[in-house]
Every structure is written in structure tokens, then in C-alpha cells.
Image: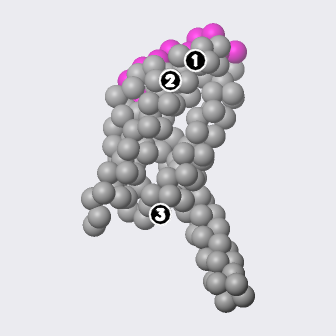
Amino acid sequence: MKYSELIKVIICNVILYIICFLILPNVFTNFYPRSNEATCLFFAMHIVITFLFMMFCSMKMRYYLISDVIYLILMFIYSGGAYGIGISKIDLDGLYSSVSKSGDLFGSAVTILIVLVIQFAIKGLVFILKKITCKKNKGEMING
């Protein structure tokens, strides 16, 4: 196990946590604690940052799985109700919802499962892109 790659992936998830749970809720206060826009921002940040880290740092999913455990712990510690994590008694009109610790574990687990699916999809995309660019570079070396 290359610890430098693992540390880079952990840094990736800490950066995601800081952006998604500390910066975005304070910048876009009208979207939080929950809205469709907030959820789109959350997953857009995950897609962009995970793509960049997989392209330039590490594609090894075992590192992402280890760092996702840390990310899950950070999400469980967070109790701001962003993205619906920890919100219980959700009514359709949203007037009677409240934040409680009982919903944190379930909301965090569902969120981390969705993040894992995104990470696996991005890994496949990055793998295909790297194969295409590798073949293109080999073709240029032969022809050039």
C-alpha cells in the first residue's frame, strides 16, 4: 500500500467535506438545509473533485473505500441537517421537519452509498479516458 496515494485520497475527501458541509451551506444559505439545488451542488462537487483526483492522483478504489470511512465519520459528526442528513419527520410542505441524531446514521449511510456509486462510475470513465489517451499517444509515437 502506497501511503502517499492514500493520504492524497484522504485529503480529497477532507476537501470535499470542507466544501460540501462547511463552505457551501454558508455561501448559498437560501439552498440549505435541504433543497434540490443543494443536492445538485453536493453531487457536482463530488463528481468534479473525484474526477480530478482519479485523473491525477490515484484510481485505486481501496484507497477511496478507506477514505470514505473517514468521510462517513465526518458526515456523522456534522449535525447541520444539510442535504437532509439527520432530518426526521419530513412532511411534504417541510414545515414540521426537525434535525435529530437518530436520522444521522441512516442519512449518512445512504449518502455514502451514492458517493460510492459515483466513485465507481468515475473510475470507469477515467479508465476509459486513460486507455484512449494511451492509445493515441502510442499512435503519435509510431507515426511521429
Q: Which mark is residue 23?
A: 2
Q: Residues within 10 Å of mark 2 (few under 14, many from 20)?
A: few
Q: Which residue is mark 1?
A: 27
Amino acid at dot 3: Met
C-alpha gap between disc 2 and disc 3: 26 Å
Task: Specify whether residue 101 is painted magenta.
Answer: yes
Q: Is residue 91 left or right of residue 19?
A: right
Does 43 appear above or below 120? above
User: Of the residues under marks 2 and 3, which one precedes in the sequence?
Assistant: 2
Q: Report the span colored magenta.
A: 93-106
Q: Residues within 10 Å of mark 3 (few under 14, many from 20)?
A: many
Query: Which element is circle 1 on?
Result: helix
Amino acid at dot 1: Val
Quadrant of res 70: top left
Task: Identify the residue at image location x=63%, y=40%.
Answer: 44
Q: Which residue is mark 3?
A: 59
Quadrant of res 126: bottom right
Image coords of residue 4 (percent x, y): 30, 57
